[in-house]
Amino acid sequence: MDAKKVTPPALWAYGYEIKPPQPEERLRAIKALLDHEHWDAQLQARTWRGKVVVEKQVTHILVVSDAAEQDREINRKLAAELKALNVGFSMTAPMPVADDATHGPADAVLTQSSEGTEKPT
Protein backbone atom coordinates (compact mmCIF):
# COMPACT_ATOMS: atom_id res chain seq x y z
CA MET A 1 0.00 0.00 0.00
CA ASP A 2 1.47 3.39 -1.00
CA ALA A 3 1.40 6.04 1.69
CA LYS A 4 0.34 9.39 0.31
CA LYS A 5 2.56 12.29 1.21
CA VAL A 6 0.58 14.85 3.18
CA THR A 7 1.53 18.41 2.39
CA PRO A 8 0.52 21.14 4.81
CA PRO A 9 -1.79 23.76 3.29
CA ALA A 10 -0.13 26.83 1.88
CA LEU A 11 -2.58 29.21 3.58
CA TRP A 12 -4.48 29.26 6.85
CA ALA A 13 -7.41 31.46 7.85
CA TYR A 14 -8.62 32.43 11.30
CA GLY A 15 -10.50 35.29 12.82
CA TYR A 16 -11.27 37.40 15.82
CA GLU A 17 -14.87 38.11 16.78
CA ILE A 18 -15.38 41.39 18.64
CA LYS A 19 -18.54 42.06 20.63
CA PRO A 20 -20.11 44.49 20.85
CA PRO A 21 -19.42 45.65 17.29
CA GLN A 22 -17.08 48.62 17.06
CA PRO A 23 -17.21 51.62 14.74
CA GLU A 24 -14.33 51.76 12.24
CA GLU A 25 -12.91 54.97 13.69
CA ARG A 26 -12.40 53.21 17.03
CA LEU A 27 -10.34 50.50 15.31
CA ARG A 28 -7.66 52.74 13.80
CA ALA A 29 -4.91 51.26 16.00
CA ILE A 30 -6.04 47.73 15.07
CA LYS A 31 -5.95 48.59 11.35
CA ALA A 32 -2.47 50.09 11.78
CA LEU A 33 -1.27 46.84 13.40
CA LEU A 34 -2.75 44.80 10.55
CA ASP A 35 -1.15 47.01 7.91
CA HIS A 36 2.24 46.91 9.64
CA GLU A 37 2.20 43.12 9.93
CA HIS A 38 1.25 42.78 6.25
CA TRP A 39 4.12 45.06 5.28
CA ASP A 40 6.54 43.18 7.56
CA ALA A 41 5.40 39.83 6.10
CA GLN A 42 6.05 41.09 2.58
CA LEU A 43 9.58 42.13 3.54
CA GLN A 44 10.21 38.63 4.92
CA ALA A 45 8.59 36.85 1.93
CA ARG A 46 5.75 35.55 4.12
CA THR A 47 2.01 35.69 3.65
CA TRP A 48 0.00 37.49 6.31
CA ARG A 49 -3.00 39.70 5.69
CA GLY A 50 -5.63 40.96 8.11
CA LYS A 51 -8.92 42.68 7.37
CA VAL A 52 -11.48 44.36 9.62
CA VAL A 53 -15.10 43.61 8.71
CA VAL A 54 -17.72 45.65 10.57
CA GLU A 55 -21.22 44.19 10.75
CA LYS A 56 -24.32 45.17 12.73
CA GLN A 57 -23.99 42.56 15.49
CA VAL A 58 -20.27 41.80 15.51
CA THR A 59 -16.96 43.06 14.19
CA HIS A 60 -14.53 40.55 12.67
CA ILE A 61 -10.83 40.60 12.06
CA LEU A 62 -10.17 38.08 9.31
CA VAL A 63 -6.60 36.81 8.93
CA VAL A 64 -4.98 34.76 6.17
CA SER A 65 -1.47 33.53 6.85
CA ASP A 66 1.09 31.03 5.63
CA ALA A 67 1.30 29.64 9.18
CA ALA A 68 -1.34 28.26 11.52
CA GLU A 69 0.40 29.54 14.66
CA GLN A 70 -1.61 32.01 16.68
CA ASP A 71 1.03 32.79 19.29
CA ARG A 72 2.95 35.26 17.16
CA GLU A 73 3.82 38.77 18.26
CA ILE A 74 1.02 40.20 16.09
CA ASN A 75 -1.55 38.08 17.93
CA ARG A 76 -0.29 39.35 21.29
CA LYS A 77 -0.39 42.96 20.04
CA LEU A 78 -3.93 42.55 18.69
CA ALA A 79 -5.10 41.00 21.96
CA ALA A 80 -3.51 43.82 23.97
CA GLU A 81 -5.12 46.48 21.78
CA LEU A 82 -8.54 44.81 22.00
CA LYS A 83 -8.20 44.63 25.79
CA ALA A 84 -7.24 48.32 25.85
CA LEU A 85 -10.46 49.06 23.93
CA ASN A 86 -12.30 47.19 26.71
CA VAL A 87 -14.22 44.94 24.31
CA GLY A 88 -14.98 41.26 24.45
CA PHE A 89 -13.36 39.13 21.78
CA SER A 90 -12.72 35.54 20.84
CA MET A 91 -10.43 33.90 18.32
CA THR A 92 -11.31 31.06 15.97
CA ALA A 93 -9.12 28.05 15.37
CA PRO A 94 -7.00 28.21 12.22
CA MET A 95 -8.55 26.49 9.22
CA PRO A 96 -6.69 25.44 6.09
CA VAL A 97 -7.63 27.37 2.99
CA ALA A 98 -8.43 25.19 -0.01
CA ASP A 99 -5.52 24.92 -2.40
CA ASP A 100 -7.05 25.34 -5.83
CA ALA A 101 -6.85 27.71 -8.75
CA THR A 102 -9.68 29.89 -7.46
CA HIS A 103 -7.71 30.91 -4.37
CA GLY A 104 -4.89 33.26 -5.11
CA PRO A 105 -2.96 35.40 -2.70
CA ALA A 106 -4.25 36.32 0.74
CA ASP A 107 -6.04 39.40 -0.64
CA ALA A 108 -8.17 37.23 -2.89
CA VAL A 109 -9.07 34.87 -0.04
CA LEU A 110 -10.08 37.78 2.17
CA THR A 111 -12.22 39.20 -0.63
CA GLN A 112 -14.02 35.86 -0.94
CA SER A 113 -14.40 35.63 2.85
CA SER A 114 -16.00 39.04 3.19
CA GLU A 115 -18.55 39.06 0.34
CA GLY A 116 -20.81 42.07 0.58
CA THR A 117 -18.37 44.02 2.71
CA GLU A 118 -15.44 46.30 2.10
CA LYS A 119 -12.88 44.71 -0.22
CA PRO A 120 -9.14 44.74 0.56
CA THR A 121 -7.14 47.41 -1.19
Image: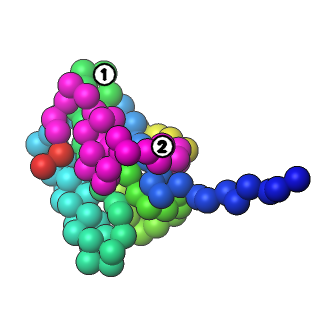
**What are the residue bounds of the magenta stretch?**
94-119
Q: Which mark is residue 57?
A: 1
Label 2 CA crowd tier, 10 Å (few <14, some 14–19, many 20+)? few
Question: Can you say whether 109 is above or below 43 in the image?
Answer: above
Does residue 113 belong to the magenta stretch? yes
Which label is found at residue 28?
none
Instruction: Give how far across and how far down residue 58 sits, in percent.
Output: 32, 28
* Mark in front: 2 vs 1: 2
Q: Does the magenta stretch include residue 55?
A: no
* CA distance separating discs 2 and 1: 28 Å
Circle 1 SS class: loop
Q: Quadrant of residue 61?
A: top left
Q: Is mark 2 on a helix, strand or loop?
A: loop
Front position in the image: 19 or 107: 107
The residue drawn where x is 32% and y is 50% is: 104
Crowding at label 1, few (<14), some or many (≥20) Cα neighbours within 10 Å? few
Q: Are marks 2 and 1 in contact (CB under 8 Å)?
A: no
Q: Is residue 85 visible?
A: no
- The x, y position of residue 91, in whole percent, is 48, 43
Q: Is residue 51 above or below residue 5?
A: above
Mark 2 vs 1, N-terminal side: 1
Residue that mark 2 sits on: 98
Q: In this view, does 115 lie above or below 38?
A: above
